[in-house]
Amino acid sequence: MNIINEYLEQILFFAYISCIAFFTASGSFFLQYTFREGAIFGRYLPILARLILRFTDKRKYKSIPNTRGHDNTFIMEAYNTAAYKILGGCGVCSNIWQSFIVYLFVFGVEKKWYICLIFLLISNLFYRKIDK
């Protein structure tokens, strides 16, 4: 009977992790949706790209036009940097970091490292399925 209780407890914990991972992936997808052009945070990615180029490559930053038009070709210059991807330029990349932060808030650091890895993998799987 004790073995059945332990097994049931593990299944419920996995279901709990999966639910939190699903909501984390849904939140990440919602953020990516709001970063698109014309959405509420549509100006975030161009501003982020300008800031990254400002601190990484001064020559490319000076060549960016100061217009408020839709000439966002400079975003591709910043896309190859890790900071741009983590801060919202790449949905999958930012989902991993957002999931890691949620994991630390929900579970803390007292859990085993493989539980964190499982949580990140489940969240990434849900994000990819939602993004299709």
Image (tube, helix red, strand yellow):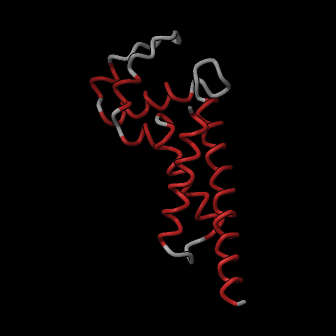
The quarter of the rendered structure image containing the N terminus is: bottom right
Q: Is residue 60 left or right of residue 20?
A: left
Could you tell me which residue is drawn at 40 percent across and 16 percent down? Answer: 73
Against 112, is 38 above or below? above
Quadrant in the picture for residue 104: bottom right
Q: Is residue 25 left or right of residue 86?
A: right
Viewer-closest of 64 and 76 = 76
Against 118, is 81 above or below? above
Residue 109 location in percent, x, y? 55, 73
Q: Is residue 85 left or right of residue 125?
A: left
Viewer-closest of 70 and 60 = 70
- Furthest-bottom residue in view? 2
Could you tell me which residue is drawn at 58 percent across and 19 percent down? Answer: 37
Residue 75 location in percent, x, y? 41, 24
Quadrant in the picture for residue 5: bottom right
**Number of numbered discs overlaid on the protein picture:** 0
Against 51, is 60 above or below? above
Residue 120 location in percent, x, y? 52, 56
Q: Is residue 107 left or right of residue 68?
A: right
Viewer-closest of 28 and 2 = 2
Could you tell me which residue is drawn at 57 percent across and 51 percent down? Answer: 123
Residue 65 location in percent, x, y? 41, 13
Could you tell me which residue is drawn at 63 percent across and 69 percent down? Answer: 107
The quarter of the rendered structure image containing the C terminus is: top right
